[in-house]
Amino acid sequence: MRYLLIIFISVLTLQLTQAQTYEIGLFAGGSNFIGDVGSTKYINPKQPVFGGIFKWNRSSRHSFRFTLLYSELVGDDLKSDDPRRKERGYKFNSHIIEASLGLEFTFFDFNLHSRKTNSTPYLYTGITVAKHDNFHFSPSGNFINDNTYSFAYGIPMVLGYKTQLSESLIIAAEIGARYTFSDEIDGSIPDAEGSIENASFGNINNNDWYVFTGLTLTYTFGETPCYCAF
């Protein structure tokens, strides 16, 4: 039984090795924040965002995807269309590092080893975790950094379009909103440690969002896959 198990694992490993096709590359674009401070525009990339992306293509229609991105989220009430926010005049900037893991689904077959050029819209979702700065605002509206950080978990909702430039290069454009399970990114609900009492403000029923808009360029490698098993 032991030897049969070893043989089975070896065969399975060999099959997976022969069936794997990978992509690795870069993401670059812009970010914007949607919350209790700053502009209420949904797609308004202002601050640069960049990082890396890795994909494991399991079929011509879906891939496992991982990204690691860095940006600086900025909220400025003076750039809002809301007159109450303009009068308040709060402003913040927060450094954010996001890791995301999930599934990418294509609308049409995207066979990397086809002789014809591939192009297709796609959707991506999964889970994100973002490390961000903690801060709060004083009664006079001054930004105060707490010199600590927290983690915000969320769900990415990404819509994109990709095309194959060559046998080994793929370029894509995408817009990705992140709904977080946190209302602390903009300092509206300060972390208890290091912040002042009764410093909360804004709509406590709405969590924070942020959006990454940009381009990816990936390099493909790996053996020609056998998609029939998936």
Image: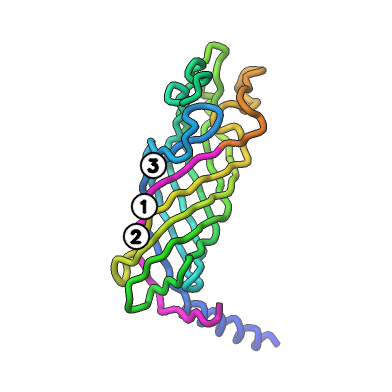
- Nearer the observer, 2 or 18: 18
The total number of labels drawn is: 3
Q: Secondary structure at mark 1?
A: strand
Question: Which mark is first along the chain, 2 or 1?
Answer: 2
Q: Earlier in the sequence, mark 3 or mark 1?
A: 3
In the orientation shown, which residue stands out farthest toward the left? 166
Of mark 3 and mark 2, the one earlier in the sequence is 3
Quadrant placement of the C terminus? bottom right
Give the spatial CA distance, label 3 vs label 2.
17 Å
Q: Which residues are magenta?
A: 209-230
Would you call the spot at circle 3 few (<14 residues within 10 Å), some (14-19), or many (20 or more)? many
Q: Position of residue 104 (x, y in %)?
A: 50, 61
Residue placed at 50% from the left, 19% from the top?
Answer: 83
Look at the numbered disc 2 and give the secondary structure of its residue: strand
Q: CA distance from mark 3 to mark 1?
A: 10 Å
Closest to the observer: 135 or 102? 102
In the rendered image, residue 193 lying in the magenta stretch gets the answer no
Residue lying at 32% horizontally and 65% vertically, measured from the top left? 169
Type of amino acid at the residue the image marks with label 1 = Leu
Q: Which mark is residue 215?
A: 1
Q: Mark 2 is on which residue type?
A: Ile
Q: Which residue is mark 2?
A: 171
Expressed as whole percent of the image width and height from the top left, the position of residue 154 reads 59, 46
**Which of the two residues, 176 or 216, is positioned nearer the viewer here?**
176
Q: Which residue is mark 3?
A: 30
Look at the picture and state if 95 lies above or below 128.
above
Q: Amino acid at mark 3?
A: Gly
Residue 221 falls in which quadrant of the image? bottom left
Magenta run includes residue 210: yes
Residue 31: name its quadrant: top left
Label 2 near label 1: C-beta < 8 Å? yes
